[in-house]
């Protein structure tokens, strides 16, 4: 599965964690709602579920690790999007050995830039770069990546994409995911 395809799963996990943090909804309710609204193939839905449940179960440890790296600022004061993006990446660094660290950091930076502030990418990259040094992936080698890739199952062909013409009102409705309004690719 490509990093590009997993980004949708990471974004879905971010949506769930954000909803849980800022509302009274449970993680299971938010996950079910988000997966219903964000139509993901089963493999990506499973990856999003793994991220959400993993972050929730390891959140105290992940938060302690992240807080130790943020100087002159508390983790609680970090924007909720950035905090949850970093939690997901920290979970991947410490608990998902098959995901290359460069992919984890790149995805976190890109998602932070997409959903948070202009400076979020730099901030997230700086914190996660420090975190990587203390993670099991600090000495990740391409040989490890190759070994894991050889053991991975063959990826399935991507599904056919159907292009549908819609009016502006319908397009606005389709751009709503998990209670968020997504920017169109044309405007980003």
Image: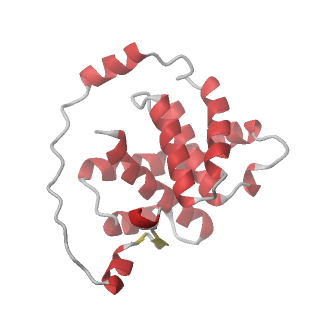
Residue at the (16%, 64%) spot, across then down: 162
Instruction: Report x, y in % for residue 15.
Output: 48, 61
Residue at the (31%, 83%) spot, across then down: 170
Side of 134 where 76 appears, left or right = right
Residue farthest to the front?
186
Task: Report the colour scheme.
Answer: secondary structure
Nearer the observer, 105 or 134: 105
Nearer the observer, 115 or 69: 115
The image quadrant of residue 18 is bottom right
Residue at the (60%, 28%) spot, across then down: 132
Establish if 171 lies above or below 73.
below
Side of 14 where 6 appears, left or right = left
The image quadrant of residue 117 is bottom right
Instruction: Report x, y in % for residue 164.
Output: 19, 73
Instruction: Report x, y in % for residue 150.
Output: 25, 20
Establish if 34 lies above or below 90.
below
Residue farthest to the right?
72
Residue at the (60%, 63%) spot, across then down: 21
Instruction: Report x, y in % for residue 72.
Output: 85, 44
Residue 134 in sight in this render: no
């Amino acid at each position: 599965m490509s990093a590009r395809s997993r980004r949708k799963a990471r974004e879905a996990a971010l949506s769930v964690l954000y909803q849980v943090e800022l509302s009274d909804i449970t993680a299971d309710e938010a996950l079910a709602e988000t997966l219903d609204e964000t139509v993901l193939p089963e493999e990506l839905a499973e990856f999003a579920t793994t991220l959400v449940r993993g972050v929730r179960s390891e959140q105290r440890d992940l938060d302690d690790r992240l807080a130790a790296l943020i100087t002159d600022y508390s983790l609680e004061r970090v924007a909720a999007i950035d905090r949850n993006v970093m939690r997901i990446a920290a979970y991947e660094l410490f608990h998902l050995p098959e995901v290359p660290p460069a992919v984890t950091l790149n995805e976190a930076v890109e998602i932070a830039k997409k959903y948070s502030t202009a400076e979020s990418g730099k901030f997230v990259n700086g914190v996660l770069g420090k975190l990587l040094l203390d993670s099991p992936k600090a000495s990740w080698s391409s040989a490890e990546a190759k070994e894991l890739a050889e053991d991975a199952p063959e990826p399935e062909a991507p599904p056919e994409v159907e292009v549908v013409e819609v009016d502006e009102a319908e397009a606005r409705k389709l751009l709503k995911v998990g209670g968020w309004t997504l920017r169109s690719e044309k405007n980003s």
